[in-house]
Amino acid sequence: MSQQYTLNRSAEFSGIGLHSGNRVNMKFLPAPANSGIRFRRVDLEGHPEIEACVENIAETNRSTTLAKGNVKVQTVEHVLAALAGHRIDNAIIELDSNEPPIADGSAREFSKMIQAAGSEALNEKREAYAVTEPIQLELGETTLALFPDAGFRISCTSADKKGRFTQFYTTEITPKTWELELAHARTFCFYEEIEYLIRNNLIKGGSLGNAVVIRDDAVLTTEPLRYVEEFVRHKMLDIVGDLSLIGRPIRGHLIAVKPSHAANCEMARQVVAQIEKPLRAAQSFAPPPPTQSASPRSRVHPPASNGAMSIEEVMKFLPHRYPFVMVDRVNMIEGNRLVAVKNVSINEPYFQGHFPGHPIMPGVLQLEAMAQAAGILMIKRADAINQIAYFMAADGVKWRKPVFPGDVLVIEVELTKARGKIGKANGVCKVGGEIVSEAEVTFMVMDG
């Protein structure tokens, strides 16, 4: 256990934002112990602040965006990576726009700011979290697995959908390796992605001065590549920034294949869940506070974060009632994605006949769970709480493994089409990280 650190003095840098294209002035400021990393929007009334934590992750499309209420800060990963790489635990980042400057597309300038400001040890201890058991997740083409380790190591493989420019790199993350091996790796994109990015109002500030462009087998850049494996090293830079949203350093070995901001941030959430697991277990056996009513209807739930919904909130979106509610809780809603949970209990009535002496959850009910989760997502996005999503069709249905009493069914859906009242979504059900069923569901939203 070591001491926490902050900056010794302030440092400033100006430039343009990669996605917004806005001119922005940025300042790093010292902060007291246990305050963490905070973004401060000095261009807005009251200078609102956004804590750099998983609860404030709002979007992960091509970059990581933090939000609190109506206040947002986009493309935070490079700044966060520089602070984490130099082991700065507490700092304030002042911005007069909605996005830090992109600089040269790496974290080089931000590292220079930190070096110019210097660091100062604080009296409070810096507590790293030692990963207690492996965490694995799959999201699209991305696979991440985190294992216990004495330090913090990343082993990463990067490639595009066509398998071009496949690169691998591994290193332990320390201030020295951060500065020498990762900090200078620039962001990159493939030429065929540029039209999509421009059409979606992204990379307004992009240029060959702040990004490497890959066209077929050619690498377009204003200078030679800084590393032989610059592309995968930049992916690792992003990982360092996104995982810093855990709020404390970790001791573990992350193995990443085709990482993305969405998967990085989901891994950060799962690490936080592992950190909080002992506390939740202790609370489950503790008596309720004296002021808390024993009535389920009067329970006070903490504010939902990242679109999370308690069962009481879920019931507002679903017309289903016992015994046909197949979603117990929504853990996350992010853009067109939703992750929900169904706890499969031996008390489920269908186990009486499916099958006596060998209880297995019917596959059609897993399909129903995907449909209900997709309906919640559609209604939530349309802000049409008084409407009902009617299940219309299912395609590509596959049941891969049985689901037994005691299993926790994780339902992941992604909305692929929403035209008028008709919606389509891809859904998968998982148990212990393994896919047990999948399907494409079609549904119609109508007045209830």
Image: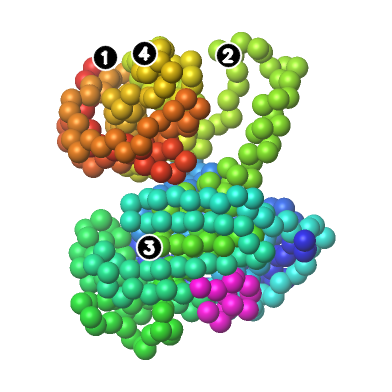
Please say whether residue 403 is one of the residues in the magenta stretch.
Answer: no
Marks 3 and 4, Cα distance to the nearest angstrom? 44 Å
Sequence-wise, the earlier of marks 1 and 3 is: 3
Mark 1 vs 2: CB contact within 8 A: no
* Nearest to viewer (mark 1 / mark 4): 4
Which of pointers 4 and 2 lies earlier in the amino acid sequence? 2
Query: In the visual, does 399 lie left or right of 255?
Result: left
Q: Left or right: where does residue 158 sit relative to residue 193?
A: right
Q: Image quadrant for the N terminus?
A: bottom right
Q: Nearer the viewer, residue 384 or 290?
A: 290
The dot on residue 296 is 2
Residue 235 x %, y %: 43, 68
Q: Which mark is residue 301?
A: none
Whole-angstrom CA distance, mark 1 to mark 3, is: 43 Å
Q: Circle 2 — which element?
A: helix
Which numbered mark, 4 or 2, is in the foreground of this view? Answer: 4
Give the class, few, some or many, for how many residues have Cα within 10 Å of label 1's Cα (few <14, many ≥20).
few
Q: Secondary structure at mark 3?
A: loop
Does the magenta portion include 173? Answer: yes
Q: Mark 2: which amino acid?
A: Pro
Query: Gap between marks 2 and 3, in whole Å?
Result: 44 Å
As shown in the figure, which amino acid type bears the numbered disc 1? Gly
In three-dimensional space, the C-alpha distance between marks 1 and 4, rounded to whole angstroms, equals 32 Å
Q: Range of the magenta residues?
A: 170-181
Residue topped by disc 3: 258
Q: Which residue is mark 1?
A: 448
| Residue at 36 percent of width and 18 percent of height | 354
Task: Report the mark closest to the observer, 1 or 3.
Answer: 3
Mark nearest the camera among 3 and 4 is: 4
At 72% across and 53% down in the image, what residue appears? 34
